[in-house]
Image (tube, helix red, strand yellow):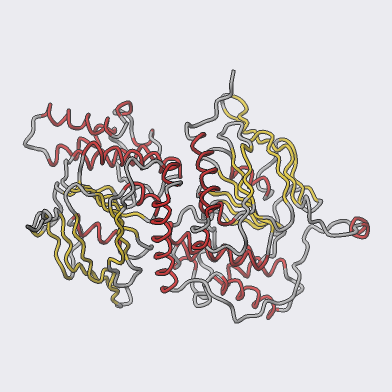
Amino acid sequence: MTNTLPPPILSLRGLSKDYSGQSGATTQVLGGIDLDIAEGEFVAILGFSGAGKTTLVNAIAGLVQLDAGEILLRGEAIEGPSKDRGVVFQSYSLFPWLSVQQNVALAVDAVHKDRSKAERAALVKHKVELVGLGHAMDRKPAQLSGGMRQRVAVARALAMEPEILLLDEPLSALDALTRAKLQDEIERIRKEEGRTILLVTNDVDEALLLADRVAVLTPAPAATIGNIWDVDVARPREREAVNDDAHFQRLRAEIVSYLGALNAESGSAGDSDVILPDVIPLDLSPLPKAYKEAAKSPVNQRYLELFKLDKIYPTPDGPLKVVDDFNLLMDRGEFISLIGHSGCGKSTVLTMAAGLNEISGGGIVLENREISTAGPDKAVVFQAPSLMPWLTARQNVALGVERVYPHASRAERKDIVDYYLDRVGLGDAMEKLAAEMSNGMRQRVGIARAFALSPRLLLLDEPFGMLDSLTRWDLQDVLVDTWNRTKVTAIMVTHDVDEAILLADRVVMMTNGPNATIGKILKVDLPRPRDRKALLEDPKFYQYRQEVLHFLAEYDHGPAVKAA
């Protein structure tokens, strides 16, 4: 006797979708998607930016008309949107003039007209409480954090009582701590509601923590379903516990390696045919002549010293000390990752080191000079790259190069600009306007601009925070490769544990604010140059990861509370 599996609740058969651009050219976004999802199953779909993830979700929701293929719900072809498919988008789209209760009630009143007023009110109350917002029923969206607003969107979708819940990167715009808390919320809803869930995400850990199966979309154009993994890791999946699980590590390494291979096939940063000119940037804040003549050797140890740093901001309730007694010594060529929860003062420390933020107490010394103002000797890459949108990639990088290399020839300056744009994978896009670039491309220009200045100190303030995880990996590799060639002293603020370990010689962990300071320093004893795939097979990597995860878990309760 043969066992037959129950028919899937959702079937995708040969889904294809083309889009036409302004130039008239047609791009095939989806190139034949086939997938079956069982009732009560949680499936996560991973994919690169532009791979068609959102197009796929919109098609299943009935919001996009396909060019070919069909979507079957319990064997019947879907026709347009319906309450049986609830959607939570990346942007929560709440009505700002309505309360939490009223925003959810709008959906309930629209799809449950057959129920009494009391039944609808009870349903709204239940779903809002389910996402942990029972205390905020009467608040307006402006009074809520980003994470709370996304909870409202989840409650609204659940209140439709859909057969299938579609989640389109609902957590990607949130900080790491809020994202982790909402991942826990989704897991609790999965357990209590037992609904079929399809999650589109760019975060491998998120997929592995939540899903029964993980499917990967191949890169655009003409995306299809590549490999599919069964996530046979026992539930509940607690972050620290699964980090030590050998099976979880193997699954994670397989998926990361597969994504890396897909990314390599699609093309990334490359070598440069341009030879970097042997010119030294102009020192715009030179040391006194007598000091230079007295110097016996260049500074290598204690190259950067952050001594008893304090930062105090005035508030209506009195002075607020954000950073308290921050002390750190760095050698020349060292790379430090600065990690901690939102509001712990990481970016404040970085902007003080850049000379962009006044120091309230203590001091910062770079190569025997106290930092007091900003300058090109301290290059900064922010989360948003801050390019001139009307200038090309080459022109944006050239602005800084012309300032610090005025003594070089025009050809040498051009070679410096072209070399670093080649290194970050923009050799074919040098004449493209910044306004026409994707976020990832603009951030590449920002990285090229920073390295082209040949700074004494490179400061990176969550430079990949606005990017999806897969684009972030690509740019991390670009950063690692470029840093390996320059060995510039660098500090990077990040929320990403893997990123912190991959890049740094030491990971500096900050306690929660206010009065934030250094809580722990982890020395990363992993050989350079570092390869992501090799790291995932190194037991030391997971030991380091566990130390950082444990520290962050200890401080996930919010602002630090000093003992009485």
In the current view of this chain or complex, which residue is farthest to the top? 564
**How many discs appear?**
0
In this rendering, position of residue 511 left or right of residue 553: right
Please state which of residues 166 and 416 is positioned toward the viewer in this rendering.
166
Apparent side of residue 225 relative to residue 539 in the rendered image (left or right): left
**Where does the image place residue 37, in percent across and percent down from the top left?**
19, 55
Determine which quarter of the picture holds residue 388.
bottom right
Q: Residue at x 31, y 51 (%)?
A: 232
State the image coordinates of residue 486 (x, y, percent, origin top left).
Answer: 67, 66
**Can you say whether 114 is above or below 523 in the image?**
above
Q: Residue furthest front?
A: 1
Q: Residue at x 62, y 33 (%)?
A: 313
Q: Nearer the viewer, residue 540 or 389?
A: 540
Could you tell me which quadrant the C terminus lies in?
top right
**Which residue is located at x 68 percent, y 41 percent?**
358
Residue 142, image x, y percentages: 38, 36
Q: Is residue 57 above or below residue 312?
A: below
Q: In the figure, is residue 30 to the left or right of 65?
A: right
Residue 254 percent across, percent down from the top left: 40, 61
Query: Is residue 533 or residue 462 the one in the foreground?
Result: 533
The relative height of residue 115 versus residue 542 in the rendered view (above or below) is above
- Quarter of the image with the N terminus in it: bottom left
Q: Which residue lies at the image location 17% right of the left edge and 57% below the top edge?
A: 62
